[in-house]
Amino acid sequence: MSKIVAIWQKIDLIKKISMGVVLGLILGLIVPKFQVIGLLGTLFVGALKAVAPILVFSLVAHALSQTQKGQKTNMKMVIFLYLVGTFSASLVAVVASFFFPMRLVFSDIASTTDITPPQGVAQVFQTLLLNVVDNPINALATANYIGVLSWAVIFGLAFRHASHQTKDLLQSAAEVTSKVVTWVINLAPFGIMGLVFSTIASNGLVALKNYGLLLLVLVSSMVFVALVVNPLIALFVMKTNPYPLVFQCLRESGVTAFFTRSSAANIPVNMKLCEKLGLDPDTYSVSIPLGATINMAGAAVTINVLTMAAVHTLGITVDFGSALLLSVVAALSAAGASGVAGGSLLLIPVACSLFGIPNDLAMQVVGVGFVVGVIQDSCETALNSSTDVLFTAVAEKSAWKK
């Protein structure tokens, strides 16, 4: 038994995750009713979600407590890249929708959700601002990362004036939390196996056949952003070949995010990848949880593709100015997606309101989103999460830094 464990420990984590994917697929097809296997995935995601808020708070507070006056980080560049990346993805989705116009069949599918969407961009950002001043204990308990980040920054700045013993204690807390995260991440192959099993056993692809073109445009747009747009941005900033970094981020962050379908759950994975890449902890301890909140290229694609599908279905003419405005609104709304229950899909009515589409029809579009969500949400999360690490690394390797 000890020899088996030793061999297992020598195998690269990505290879072990690949083995988990294949095994989960096979078991999902052979024994779909053996739901105990799916429990492994639920436990894995639950553990990641549980430890992530504590990790973010401890790392951010510790990083800021050690920051000296005048010390430079790459946060301005990271935030700029987040905004440019999200807007670019939004624009790609609009262009793709013009080239491949889709039409939806409206029905009562919207009755599958009773979540109330926000009434406009202002409400999205009002929710976002209220999350900033959330009770810190509640923010940790509910995984409100805007609240966790804001209080971690406040406490971190306050700890700069604390004694060395107190700072050492804060450092120990960050190191212990990081160790726990490492243990959880090492269980990823079993967790991913359970997640793949649950997806294959419960959903399959039969229910998605009527939405083939919609899924094709959604996924293709996200792939284009991941493999063309983001590398172009990285090339412009780094002045070197970005693809080795792009593929590493997709392989080690995107794959895990695809199956967990949670940017929050993938924060610990991204933190470890940033450490592996040798990035500055003072930057990535803030940029990764911030990216999980505002860097939403995948969400922008989802909002625009589904909104444009509704526009084409209703025969509404869209000029260049309206398309550009839609891209801006989708990018801004996507940045606030984490502050709204239901995520990116529930922000579709905000974009639809630009074209005067009634809320009841907009909610039917949301219903379509839930139908294709098995694949859409996985691809969206993979793009969002892998881009967090990519742009953090690109900012640090920027050729424009003084």
Image (cartoon, rainbow, N blue to C red):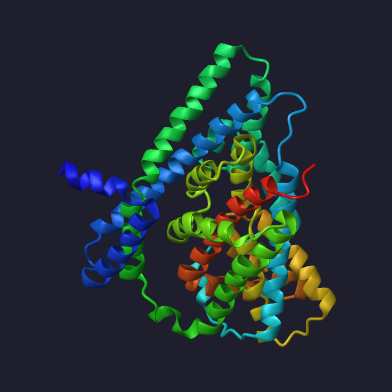
**In front of the other: 212 or 139:** 212
Query: How many numbered badges does the structure rendering display?
Result: 0
Residue 350 showing in the rendered view: no
Query: Is the residue 331 above or below the residue 57 in the image?
Result: below
Q: Residue at x 68, y 48 (%)?
A: 397
**Residue ranking furthest to the front:** 240
Q: Position of residue 147 (x, y in %)?
A: 62, 38
**In front of the other: 398 or 144:** 398
Q: Residue at x 63, y 58 (%)?
A: 296
Of the 4 image quadrants, the one containing the N terminus is top left
Q: Residue at x 54, y 30 (%)?
A: 58
State which quadrant residue 19 falls in: bottom left
Q: Position of residue 224 (x, y in %)?
A: 62, 72
Q: Position of residue 133 (x, y in %)?
A: 67, 36
Residue 360 showing in the rendered view: yes
**Residue ranking furthest to the left:** 1
**In front of the other: 72 or 312:** 72
Of the 4 image quadrants, the one containing the C terminus is top right
Residue 6 is left or right of residue 258, and the answer is left
Q: Position of residue 285 (x, y in %)?
A: 59, 38
**In front of the other: 10 or 290:** 10
Q: Residue at x 26, y 72 (%)?
A: 29
